[in-house]
Image: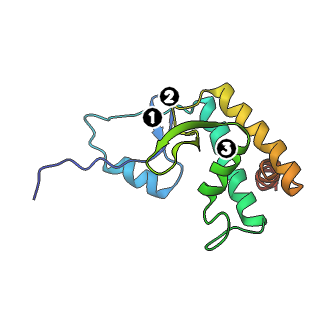
């Protein structure tokens, strides 16, 4: 057996210097913590994360609602659909290929690869591209579904 200390990871609110649990599991984790010392990590969400989340969710909605997706289709995964849309809207970069020499590949949307303005531009251009090619806006469809879920 190792002497490693178990450090459960869970999300809680801090009010007046006290940890407030959002549910029974979180309360159980709080109760297990040693009374002498707490390690609290604060993660902040950057504006880029919100735009990236909308983009990925919209691509999933699009993937679920158009023909040619899934195994054996033109776009077997949502990732392949996203990459094609990024290339079609100009968010691509040349890469070296052993077979083709140079070719264009979709730019990465990972943290630190695109700034906020680029992500917003990619989202808006993808919105226009989807409207022109498939006749609906999957990003707005997802946003409307989230609003309905939130407001009942």
Element type where label 1 sits in the image: strand
Front in this rendered view, residue 130 or 22: 130
Closer to the camera: disc 1 or disc 3?
Answer: 3
Mark 2 vs mark 3: which is more N-terminal? 2
The C terminus: image quadrant: bottom right
How far apart in space, not on screen, are marks 1 and 2 (Cα)?
Answer: 6 Å
Q: Residues within 10 Å of mark 2 (few under 14, many from 20)?
A: few
In the rendered structure, the answer to whether residue 29 lies left or right of residue 136 reads: left
Rendering coords of residue 149 (x, y %)? 77, 56
Report the residue at 45% width, 32% height from top: 42
Front in this rendered view, residue 88 or 36: 88
Rendering coords of residue 81 (x, y %)? 66, 56
The N terminus: image quadrant: bottom left
**Up-down: is 113 above or below 7?**
above
Q: Say which residue label 1 marks.
A: 18
Rendering coords of residue 22 (x, y %)? 54, 49
Residue 87, which numbered label?
3
Report the residue at 26% width, 42% height from top: 34
**Up-down: is 19 above or below 74?**
above
In the rendered structure, the answer to whether residue 48 lies left or right of residue 38 reads: right
Q: Are marks 1 and 3 in contact (CB under 8 Å)?
A: no
Report the residue at 39% width, 55% height from top: 28
**Up-down: is 138 above or below 106?**
below
How far apart in space, not on screen, are marks 2 and 3 (Cα)?
Answer: 49 Å
Report the residue at 67% width, 43% height from top: 87
Q: Residues within 10 Å of mark 1 (few under 14, many from 20)?
A: few
Element type where label 3 sits in the image: helix
Residue 29 showing in the rendered view: yes
Rendering coords of residue 142 (x, y %)? 77, 53
How far apart in space, not on screen, are marks 1 and 3 (Cα)?
Answer: 49 Å
Q: Say which residue label 2 marks.
A: 16
């Amino acid at each position: 057996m190792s002497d490693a200390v178990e450090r459960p990871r869970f999300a809680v609110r801090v009010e007046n210097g006290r940890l407030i649990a959002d549910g029974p599991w979180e309360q159980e984790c709080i109760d297990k913590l040693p009374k002498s010392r707490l390690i609290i990590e604060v993660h902040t969400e950057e504006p880029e994360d919100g735009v990236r989340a909308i983009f990925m969710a919209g691509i999933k909605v699009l993937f679920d609602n158009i023909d040619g997706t899934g195994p054996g289709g033109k776009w077997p995964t949502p990732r392949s659909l996203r990459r094609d849309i990024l290339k079609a809207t100009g968010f691509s970069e040349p890469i070296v290929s052993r077979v083709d020499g140079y070719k264009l590949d979709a730019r990465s949307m990972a943290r630190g690869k695109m700034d906020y303005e680029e992500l917003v531009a990619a989202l808006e251009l993808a919105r226009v591209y989807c409207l022109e090619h498939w006749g609906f806006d999957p990003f707005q469809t997802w946003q409307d579904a989230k609003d309905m879920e939130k407001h009942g």
